[in-house]
Image: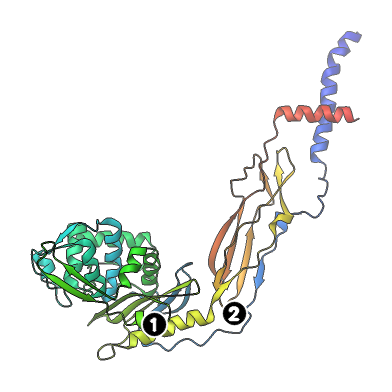
Amino acid sequence: MLKKYLIYLPLIMISLLFLCYCHMKNRPADPISDIQTAAEIPPDHIPPAAASSSPAPRLYASAACVMDAGSGRILYGKSEASPLPMASTTKIMTCILALENGNMEDPVTFSSKAASMPKVRLGAGKGKTFLLGDLLYSLMLESHNDTAVAIAEHLGDSVEGFAAMMNAKAAELGMSQTNFVTPNGLDAEGHASTPADMCRLASYACNNQTFLELIRTPSKTIRETSGKGSFSLTNHDAFLTSYKGAIGIKTGFTNKAGYCFVGAAQRNGLTLVSCVLGSGWPPNKSYKWADTKALMNLGFENFSMKNVPVKDLSVYSIIVENGKADAVGILQPEIPSFLLSDADAIDIRYSLPPKIQAPVRQGTAVGEIQILVNGSPLGSYPVYPSEDVERETFADIVYDIFHLFLSF
């Protein structure tokens, strides 16, 4: 009879130990000193330090924009998302594609189509051949329309093929309101962009050192590959020599577009890009320079790099379910400084879960910090756990049961 009951004794003991384990796992966790769970992180709101920034500049341009080249933040805009013809500022894209897709030592021959382009043009004539690298000076310093077509046909086999390359690059850069039809910016149905999109293009172009060297070249003499003909080129960008810290970039004019200019300037490590479209028509050739300087002054005088006061996340933890540890700490993310003005309102949102399932990996983000300026997203930054936490296995459970049993 005793043997019969002894058969059930191990089962009874295991059941009791299992009940003890369940009780242990479901008991309230011991509080961790000075540590709060991530679910308790409230958002931050930093109101403007000043009621408003400087008054909006009085511009001649139909549409304009000034942007921080580093972050892509628009500092000021006037109809900055309205598509308009952009004339020869188009050649910024033509130049970048040539730099990225062409060999500067390649010979480029002018076709009859290229040679037929209206002024402004190099005037080399059909069949004349130059090195691609030399033609980029013709393109950017003198804004030659025939050169743009010769480059387009060389790289894209045709103007239409090159336009497809231009639009593909525009999509890659987030120029969602832009459509390229020509490589030179001559008026064509559907050929248009916005000041904001052209600033995005300029920001990208400013990362190319060869491009920067090109647009800052005062003058250049190029020759045909045969050595016979030579052409003297002069940079017509007056902004380059009339504004402190000016980098360039490109002028433009057509009867439909009016005077246009995409510019860039750098001071104290800060690079701003601007665009003015429809900034007057003849004889008001100087309006584009006045508009560009006003936009740049607004940026440099009212904005500076500032740190955003993000909470110290190292004092928080996230509960870990089914893990070998009950909670895991949080690594403090690296948040860069931002170009801000005293009139900016800043909001910081912490998106972190109250609990996560094991296993936890240090290299896998568990949440993010989002920073908004005046209600618009400025940047999102991932948040990572401070260490790995392995999932609790059956062997771990057995060990915990016996450890509990021995502690009785």
- Horizontal and vertical percent for residue 235? 27, 77
In the displayed structure, does residue 182 sit left or right of residue 43?
Answer: left
Residue 190 shows up from this direction: no
**Mark 1, residues whose alpha carbon is within 10 Å: few (<14), some, or many (≥20)?**
many
- Horizontal and vertical percent for residue 240? 35, 79
Q: Circle 1 sits on which residue?
A: 292
User: Looking at the image, which residue sits at the far bottom?
Assistant: 283
Contact, CB < 8 Å: mark 2 with mark 1? no
Query: What numbered label is drawn on residue 30?
Result: none
Up-down relation of residue 25 to residue 380 (above or below): above
In the displayed structure, does residue 345 sit left or right of residue 128?
Answer: right
Quadrant into which the C terminus falls: top right
* Upstream in sequence: badge 2 or badge 1: 1
Query: Disc 2 marks which amino acid?
Result: Asp
Query: What numbered label is drawn on residue 342?
Result: 2
Q: Secondary structure at mark 1?
A: helix
Question: Which residue is painted at 64% across and 60% down in the image?
Answer: 350
Query: Disc 1 marks which amino acid?
Result: Thr
Quadrant into which the N terminus falls: top right
In the displayed structure, does residue 408 sit left or right of residue 285?
Answer: right
Question: Which residue is painted at 62% across and 83% down in the image?
Answer: 50
User: Looking at the image, which residue sits at the far front?
Assistant: 227
Spatial separation of the CA atoms under disc 2 and disc 1: 23 Å
Up-down relation of residue 125 to residue 289 (above or below): above
Colouring scheme applied when the structure was drawn: rainbow
Residue 338 shows up from this direction: yes
Up-down relation of residue 41 to residue 241 (above or below): above
Question: Which residue is painted at 69% across and 31% down in the image?
Answer: 393
